[in-house]
């Protein structure tokens, strides 16, 4: 035994102990428990949401999502760093916006990168897209957005005819042709590839653009149907009847509490509360007055060391 | 004195073979509460073992082959058992005020390992490559971006997520757990709190 241990345990009686045997027994217990749980319950594995499926099964949701990019009304438009050059929209607290310190490191221009660039790639195979693309590019940004907004207003009255979305007559410019082009691209299963083809590194390991495309109403609708939105006391679920990341409930719960629940700076507020209350406080808890006395007031320690106290009496 | 001799001295002062692999324990180490730490350690062993198999065969295997799905389930339930044991371990150490007598470094390193484990859990969800991964990636990015973390970590970048989850974070956890275990065995189990009930009875 080291000099340090001799000092620490001086005067304390000891008993025989077998560390390895204890380790092996606990490992066996853990393995048995995990085997039984895995055999009985399996694990969640809900299929990915694919552009092809959305375009085929929910064409109106698909064109609505796409038109929002052109109208500048998607969640990504004006997001701020790290995606867009809109520092005013970065979340801030007391005037401090940490996101702005690092700038735009993952630049994404929704209309250009998520709609027009894929359409240009598709136009190589689908020449009918060339004219509407040229007409759209030739217009001012204000005109482009006005067409897209008008189209969005008409989607509610649109009809799906085969692989096309047909809107009532209106001032949409070339937007209906572009939307049907995107719909064809989506139905073909080539949209994800067309989105990722635009990234800086051609080896497709970064799925940002494909994931950002459906992050809005489409993903939310799927998550809602799977009870994954966590709007009941922040308890977010796994897909299916599984416990999910219950160890994050103290964090997700904060999103249900005012002002974080409705604040545009909610994420920053939640992260700062987590940093102080759930990281720094537990880390330095032994030095925090009152909190470091709690174990003495709640006599759980008497149960843990009951044989020692019995021995002392 | 050369470097090896110095290292021998450090070990003699802090961690002999009997400290590292004890054959005797203080008599007060006599409760199930002492097993929660061992439980989380062994769940970590199970996670590394099942994780190595998942990494070796890859996503297509663990999504579509029955054996792959079962190993994926072993990993999933291993995570549940790991965090359950860890929460019980942390609660037990809190109610034992186990940071006493200079043991704050053990407490702090354990906490850091827990925080890294939480981040590893997040990257695990992101690395599943199913709807959970898609949903959690687009949801978690906002909190990460709000504090400027988006320039360092992008939850939608599967390449980064996968290497973090499979290589970097497990190495950090194993390193922190190694330091935690070294400190535990160097300092020995904390002495029981004074028995206030007995003191009151004797008064």
Image (cartoon, helix red, strand yellow):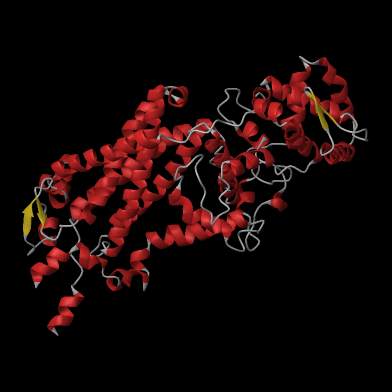
Against B200, residue A203 (above or below) is: above
Q: Give the tally of numbered discs.
A: 0
Q: Is residue A143 left or right of residue A292?
A: right
Say if residue A239 shows up in the picture.
Answer: yes
Give the residue drawn at x 43%, y 24%. Answer: B58
Give the residue drawn at x 75%, y 22%. Answer: A184
Q: Is residue B138 left or right of residue B88?
A: right
Q: Position of residue B113 (x, y in %)?
A: 36, 48
Residues A159 and A234: in front is A159
Q: Position of residue B18 (x, y in %)?
A: 10, 47
User: Residue pushed farthest bottom?
Assistant: B203
Q: Position of residue A223 (x, y in %)?
A: 59, 42
Against B46, residue A95 (above or below) is: below
Q: Position of residue B114 (x, y in %)?
A: 37, 50
Could you tell me which quadrant the C terminus of chain B lies in?
bottom left
Give the residue drawn at x 45%, y 46%. Answer: A245
Say if residue B104 shows up in the picture.
Answer: no
Could you tell me which quadrant the N terminus of chain B lies in?
top left
Against B178, residue A43 (above or below) is: above
Q: Quadrant of residue B56?
A: top left
Give the residue drawn at x 46%, y 62%. Answer: A277
User: Residue pushed farthest front?
Assistant: A40
Q: Is residue A237 left or right of residue B39?
A: right
Q: Is residue B60 left or right of residue A305?
A: right
Residues A102 and B58: in front is B58
């Amino acid at each position: 035994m080291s000099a340090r241990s001799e000092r620490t345990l001086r005067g304390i009686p000891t008993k025989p102990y077998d560390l390895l045997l204890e380790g092996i027994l606990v490992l066996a217990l853990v393995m048995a428990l995990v085997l039984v749980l895995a055999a009985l319950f399996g694990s969640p594995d809900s299929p990915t949401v694919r552009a092809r499926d959305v375009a085929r099964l929910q064409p109106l949701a698909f064109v609505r999502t796409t038109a929002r990019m052109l109208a500048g009304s998607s969640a990504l438009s004006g997001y701020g760093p790290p995606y867009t050059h809109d520092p005013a929209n970065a979340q801030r607290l007391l005037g401090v916006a940490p996101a702005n310190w690092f700038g735009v490191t993952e630049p994404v221009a929704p209309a250009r990168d998520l709609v027009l660039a894929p359409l240009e790639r598709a136009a190589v195979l689908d020449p009918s897209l060339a004219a509407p693309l040229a007409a759209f590019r030739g217009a001012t940004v204000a005109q482009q957005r006005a067409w897209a907004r008008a189209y969005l207003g008409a989607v509610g009255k649109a009809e799906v005819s085969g692989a096309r979305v047909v809107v009532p007559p209106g001032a949409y410019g070339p937007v209906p042709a572009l939307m049907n082009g995107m719909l064809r691209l989506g139905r073909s299963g080539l949209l994800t590839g067309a989105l990722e083809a635009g990234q800086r590194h051609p080896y497709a390991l970064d799925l940002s653009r494909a994931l950002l495309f459906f992050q809005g109403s489409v993903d939310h609708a799927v998550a809602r149907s799977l009870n994954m939105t966590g709007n009941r006391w922040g308890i977010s679920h796994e897909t299916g009847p599984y416990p999910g990341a219950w160890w994050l409930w103290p964090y997700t719960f904060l999103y249900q509490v005012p002002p974080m629940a409705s604040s545009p700076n909610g994420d920053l507020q939640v992260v700062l509360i987590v940093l102080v209350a759930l990281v720094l406080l537990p880390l330095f808890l032994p030095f925090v007055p009152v909190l470091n006395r709690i174990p003495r007031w709640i006599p759980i320690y008497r149960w843990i060391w009951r044989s020692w106290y019995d021995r002392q009496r | 004195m050369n470097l090896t001799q110095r290292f021998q001295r450090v070990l003699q002062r802090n961690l002999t073979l009997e400290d590292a692999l004890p054959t005797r324990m203080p008599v007060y180490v006599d409760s199930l509460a002492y097993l929660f730490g061992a439980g989380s350690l062994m769940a970590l062993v199970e996670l590394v073992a099942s994780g190595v198999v998942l990494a070796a065969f890859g996503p297509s295997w663990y999504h579509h082959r029955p054996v792959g799905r079962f190993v994926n389930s072993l990993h999933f339930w291993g995570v549940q058992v790991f965090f359950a044991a860890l929460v019980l371990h942390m609660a037990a150490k809190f109610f034992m005020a186990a940071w006493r007598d200079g043991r704050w470094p053990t407490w702090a390193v354990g906490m850091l390992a827990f925080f890294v484990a939480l981040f590893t859990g997040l990257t695990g969800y992101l690395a599943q490559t199913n709807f959970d991964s898609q949903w959690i990636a687009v949801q978690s990015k906002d909190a990460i971006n709000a504090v400027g973390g988006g320039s360092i970590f992008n939850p939608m970048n599967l390449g980064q997520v996968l290497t973090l989850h499979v290589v970097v974070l497990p190495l950090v956890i194993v390193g922190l757990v190694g330091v935690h275990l070294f400190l535990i065995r160097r300092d020995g189990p904390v002495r029981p709190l004074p028995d206030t009930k007995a003191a009151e009875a004797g008064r």
